[in-house]
Every structure is written in C-alpha cells, then in structure tokens.
Image (cartoon, grey):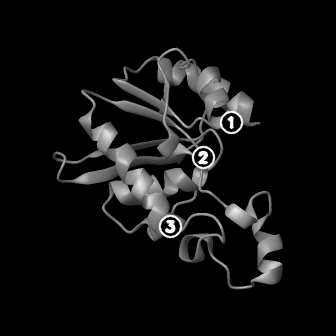
Amino acid sequence: RGEQGARELAPRLQALRFALVLSSPLRRAVRTCELAGFAAAARTDQDLCEWNYGAYEGRTTAQIRAERPDWDLFRDGCPDGECAVEVGMRADRVIARVRAAAGNALLFSSGHILRVLAARWLDLPPQSGRLLQLGTASVSVLGYEHGPHEPVVQLWNETRR
C-alpha cells in the first residue's frame, strides 16, 4: 500500500516546483522519494531520520505497554534512544534549512519525526506532535498565513489519490 501510494503522489507533486528536496536516508523514505519522482533532486538529511527508538526499536506500542502501561513516546521517549526534545532539535535544524530555501521545500521522512517537525513549525513543544496523526504516503503542507511570523498548517495527512 505504501509503494502504491508513493507512486500516486508523483503526478500531483511533479506539477509543483521545489527549491529544496530533502529525504531521510532511511530506506523507506528514500524509496518513497524515488517512487514520487524526486530521487535526482533530493539530498539526504540525517536530521530527517525517524525517532531513535533505542531499546524499543522493532517493538510495537502494545508490546511496550505490556511492560509499561502508561508509556507515551512523546512524553517518555525511549531508553537508549531519543526523547522528544532531542527529536525537536533535529526538526528545528530541518526547519531552518527549509526557511532558508528560496522557494518551496519537499520532505520525505517518517511519521514521528514529521509530527514533531509540524509541531515545531508552529512553535509548539515537540511533545505536541502526539496530537497530529500521520498516515503512510500522505501529503501535508506547512506554510504561512501572512508571512514567516505566522506559520500555519495548510493541509494535514491528506491521502486522496
């Protein structure tokens, strides 16, 4: 489903111009970028890597909550991994690069980092990313209402093909 969704993004995104295309170096993000037709334009950016889940890598939320019933990724982070503040610092660096671009930017990455990035775009704490659900191969648009001093979410988690 993810690869098909990525392929379906291509015509929609190809109609737009981007001054900057960044992708997480992780395989799924790179593959989505390729299928959407932006491999040649993309630069990989380590700061777009998914949340480092540390000791929880490869485990589901249900498995973790069997041991820690009240665990919340955005509040508690991961042992031997990252906390929300650390992910937020990476998101802030990506945002700085996006804002420095001379035009629109296109990002390919994973759900949790992008949720934190959206929260930070709005100048909210990184933990606020837990309020934003994000599906596979979805499109979201972050922008401004009246200028850079008024960041907004223009479109979120759109999966219409």
Name the residue at the top extreme: 40
What's under tag 1, amino acid-wise?
Arg
What is the x, y in percent for residue 129? 49, 63
Give the residue drawn at x 44%, y 52%: 90
What's the residue at 33%, 30% (across, down)?
104
Whether residue 131 appears in this view of the structure is: no
Dot 2 falls on a residue whose secondary structure is: loop
Q: Which quadrant does the C terminus fall into?
A: top right
- Give the alpha-carbon distance from disc 1 to disc 2, as whole Å: 8 Å
Which of disc 3 and disc 1 is earlier in sequence? Answer: 1
Pair 2/3: label in front: 3
**Among the 4 quarters of the image, the one containing residue 108:** top right
Q: Marks 3 and 2: in contact by CB < 8 Å?
A: no
Which sits in the foreground, 100 or 10? 100
Which residue has dot 3 on it?
84
Q: Most extreme residue toward the front, as rendered? A: 80
- Rendered view: 152 above or below 136: below
* Residue position marked by numbered label 2 in the rendering: 110
Q: Position of residue 117 (x, y in %)?
A: 43, 53
Q: Residues within 10 Å of mark 2 (few under 14, many from 20)?
A: many
**Figure check: 113 above or below 73:** above
- Residue 132, given in percent of the width and then of the height, sits at 52, 61
Residue receiving disc 1: 28
N-terminal label among 1 and 2? 1
Q: Say if mark 1 contacts mark 2, CB within 8 Å.
A: yes
Q: Secondary structure at mark 1?
A: helix
Q: Amino acid at mark 3?
A: Ala
Horizontal arrangement in the rendering, residue 8 relative to residue 96 (left or right): right
- Work out whether residue 161 can be spotted: yes
